[in-house]
Image (cartoon, rainbow, N blue to C red):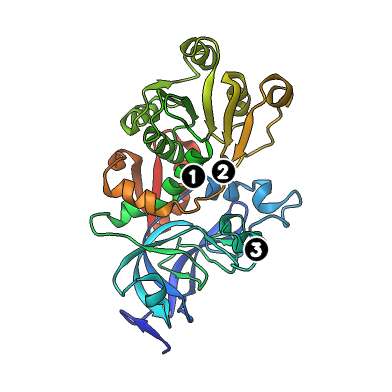
Amino acid sequence: MSYQAAEPLPTKMAAVVCQGPEDYRLEEWQTPTPGPGEVVLRVETVGICASDLKCYMGAPLFWGADGRSGYCQPPVIPGHEFAGRVVALGEGAAEKYGLALGDLAVSEQIVPCWECRFCRRGQYWMCPNGDVYGFRQRAFGAMAEYVRLPAGAINYLVPEGISAQHAAFVEPLACSIHAVQRGEIQLGDVVVIAGAGPLGLGMVAAARLKGPRLLIAVDLNDARLSIARSCGADLTLNPRTTDVVDEVLKLTGGYGCDVYIEATGHPAAVQQGLDMIRRLGTFVEFSVMREPATVDWTIIGDLKELNIHGSHLSPYCYPIAIEMLQKGLLPMEQIMTHSLPLAQFETGIELVYAGTESVKVTLQP
């Protein structure tokens, strides 16, 4: 054996395997072992992300227009929001990552190539050759009893005081932080965050730290809006009962909000943002859309001269997310609503799809 191990690894493990859209199966799979520079975790908790749901449902980003040419490469084990205990360390991995057997650890969702133009410039999160855990066969995900962190992964020790259940939220929270950074919020800004799911709630908590004059959360679910207030929102608006565009214009003397972050995944929220944002404002598009969004681009250019910023993954944000959890800046007991056994993954997917009873749904292998 060319690696350190805390325990003998079993030959086989239980894993959820994506075979295709709406074809996910609980199967027996080969347990991974680490090569040089690699780490194996015994998975404690893995979250079900909105992107996992959209992959399951067959979104074109993951499967292509022909159902075969998208980002997803079946058969593959899904799951990129995870935390686990270090049970095996390949040669050099302990020194490289500062990890020891038994540590609780997390890993950034992308495993970059470290050789392309973007990686060489420190822009590793845009690596065109990188693999996000759970979608590509070179980086199987964590909806399984064990997960291997490849040699090029970016891994972090989770400090004492953060539970494994909460540590699985480091990944979505880090994505939320990056989206807020892309908003370039200034002191005194009026900020609107559309969507109060797990990612939107993280954005509210992160945006609160930027010193906005007014922080507004928008969602169709009143229960989630209540959690948004616990995360730091000054005001919450439900489009079912309020004309949110009109309300934001009234609150800003008719000018509109300074920053709008779209985190709903629904095309209607794009038009809503364009209507309520002020001239020269900053619009951050975060979501993976289920279907294309069609808008009048004249608003962006000739009418308002907007700054349109995308937001992808979570570069350099994991340490910040870990610190926010350490400091108790989010109401985690309200956010982590459902914890299910791995075998009940289909129930978990249904809960995420409905979005009425749950906020963050996790599986326990």
Label 1 sits on residue: 178
- Could you say which disc has been placed on residue 235 in the image? none
Q: Position of residue 169 (x, y in %)?
A: 38, 50
Picture coordinates of residue 23, whole percent (x, y)? 59, 56
Q: Amino acid at mark 3?
A: Asn
From mark 2 to mark 3, how far is it between C-alphas? 18 Å
Quadrant containing the N terminus in the rendered view: bottom left
The numbered mark at residue 129 is 3
Residue projecting furthest to the right: 66
Q: Residue at x 47, y 59 (%)?
A: 108
| Residue 158 seen by the camera | yes
The image shows residue 125 at horizontal and vertical percentages of 56, 55
SS class of the residue under badge 2?
loop
Characterize the local packing of mark 2: few (<14), some (14-19) or many (20 or more) Cα atoms within 10 angstroms.
some
Q: Mark 2 vs mark 1: which is more N-terminal?
A: 1
Q: Are marks 2 and 1 in contact (CB under 8 Å)?
A: yes
Nearer the observer, 300 or 86: 300
CA distance separating discs 1 and 3: 21 Å
* Real-space Cα separation, disc 2 to disc 1, in angstroms: 7 Å
On the image, numbered disc 2 is attached to which residue?
311
Task: Tell me the crowding category of disc 1: few under 14, some 14 to 19, or many 20 or more residues within 10 angstroms, Cα based.
Answer: many
The answer to whether one can see residue 169 in this image is: no
Q: Is residue 351 above or below residue 253?
A: below
Q: Amino acid at mark 2?
A: Ser
Spot occupied by residue 160 in the image (x, y as percentages of width and height): 24, 59
Which is more N-terminal, label 3 or label 1? 3
The three-letter amino acid code for the residue at tag 1 is: His
